[in-house]
Amino acid sequence: MEATCSPQVERKVVAASTEGRSYCVAGTLLGELAELDIPAKRCERITQRIGRERIIERDARLEQYEQLPLPEQRQAPPDAPDPCWKSRVAAVLIDGGRAQIRDERWGQPHPPEETVSWWKEPKVACLATFSSPLPTSDPQAEVPDCLLDPLWVIPRVKEIKRGRGGETSECQACSSRAAREQPQEEPPRWSPEPLVRSVVATFQSYETLGRLAKVEAYHRGFMGAARKAFLGDGHLSNWAIHQRHFSHYTPITDLLHALSYVYHAALESTPDMASCWERCERWIRWVWQGEVRRVISELKPLVESAQERSRETLQESLTYLKNNASRMRYDQYRQIGLPITTTLIESTIKQINRRMKGTEKFWHPGAEPQLQLCADRISETDPLATFWKKRPARQTGFRKSRTTT
């Protein structure tokens, strides 16, 4: 179908529809900021059409890569960026967001025993380079003060727990101590600094996400990096992607997720609230030093002797630590300059959720095109700039759109 507005206007519509909370907001912004009278429904049609074009382009790129001989797949393409990998780290970070999808059964009655949820998970991969000169020793052998400060730790680990769908009680001793203490000044930065990120996302399977991430890593030239890391939150699907597509990357479980399980295990296993944080501090030190096996050894008898009310939480923490212990060698990761947290992908998910997530939003069938555009807008490699530049030559019809200079 022939476009009814210029590429410059389409570009503005896509930007407003992706950065705004809704297509209605996009129409309002275009009217007030660009003096364009474009109703919400037309914003949606234009944006969805461009999103579908980007998916076609993405899938063609994937097919082209997978048809390459294996030796070529393991080499950087000629047009890949050539950073100074001696002082760089290539990292792949995986996580998921939330969005409501209206399926084919929408509006139909369901059996009373069936639990209906329209919330689906957009799978997201963040491929980033980090500035990280190779250290000669552990740059932060001692636990940072913030990780021993309840005022800093408790809100963050509780947020992670809520993110997994659970609600927990609060350690009164920790809360009262946190209320008395003031935040300390931020210490000098020791962790690798993120430089450039690109984002791929899909509502399809984790396997599809892994394939898309592998293609993006190829075009970013990650094969040339001597130090490569793969970070996740402990979800089994993340490590399935690692084993299948990124097995030569160092696997790392996010530190803050590990501390979340440690904190809640300390909370449930301590009858005396006054000593809860004391136990938590000890376990945090062990985790930071890469000695999670010591936490597991101390936690096992606590699970066996726990009351039924607490046993489930303690067993969950024990299982998580045992399953991820081989990916929690944080002292070794710091010694070779690797990142140990997934904060970059967490912030990326929040940016995507701002557009995709909402109790008032039900996506069908336009979730995938809009998600693709969200990932494009966040990517600092600016894939949309290349798309808009090449698009006029690919258009068909009686007239091709032309840009002016």
Image (cartoon, grey):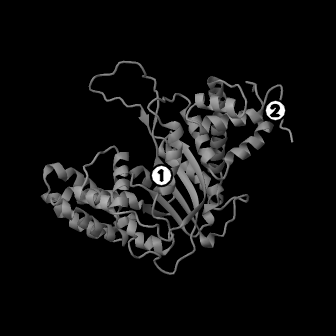
Decide if residue 120 is on the left or right side of residue 128: left
Above or below, 279 against 405 in this view is: below
Secondary structure at badge 2 equals: loop
| Residue found 46% across the figure and 70% down from its top | 333
| Residue found 34% across the figure and 52% down from its top | 158
Q: From the viewer's side, name the closer residue of 137 and 230.
A: 137
Residue 152 picture location, percent across and down: 38, 60
Give neighbour class at mark 1: few <14, some 14-19, many 20+ (Cα, 10 Å): some
Above or below, 275 against 86 in this view is: above
In which quadrant is the C terminus drawn?
top right
Secondary structure at badge 1 equals: helix
| Residue found 56% across the figure and 70% down from its top | 132
Above or below, 181 against 359 in this view is: below
The residue under label 1 is 346
Residue 7 picture location, percent across and down: 76, 34
In which quadrant is the N terminus drawn?
top right
Residue 385 picture location, percent across and down: 72, 46
Q: Quadrant of residue 49?
A: top right
Which residue of the protein is positioned furthest toward the right in this rendering? 405
Q: Nearer the viewer, mark 2 or mark 1?
A: 1
Give neighbour class at mark 2: few <14, some 14-19, many 20+ (Cα, 10 Å): some
Decide if residue 211 is on the left or right side of residue 305: right
Q: From the viewer's side, name the closer residue of 131 and 220.
A: 131
Q: Mark 2 vs mark 1: which is more N-terminal?
A: 1
Residue 401: which disc?
Answer: 2
Q: From the viewer's side, name the closer residue of 233 and 397.
A: 233
Decide if residue 236 is on the left or right side of residue 366: left
Q: What is the three-letter code of the residue carrying label 1? A: Glu
Q: What is the three-letter code of the residue carrying label 2? A: Ser
Instruction: Please say whether residue 258 is visible from this viewpoint.
Output: no
Which residue of the protein is positioned furthest toward the top in this rendering? 108
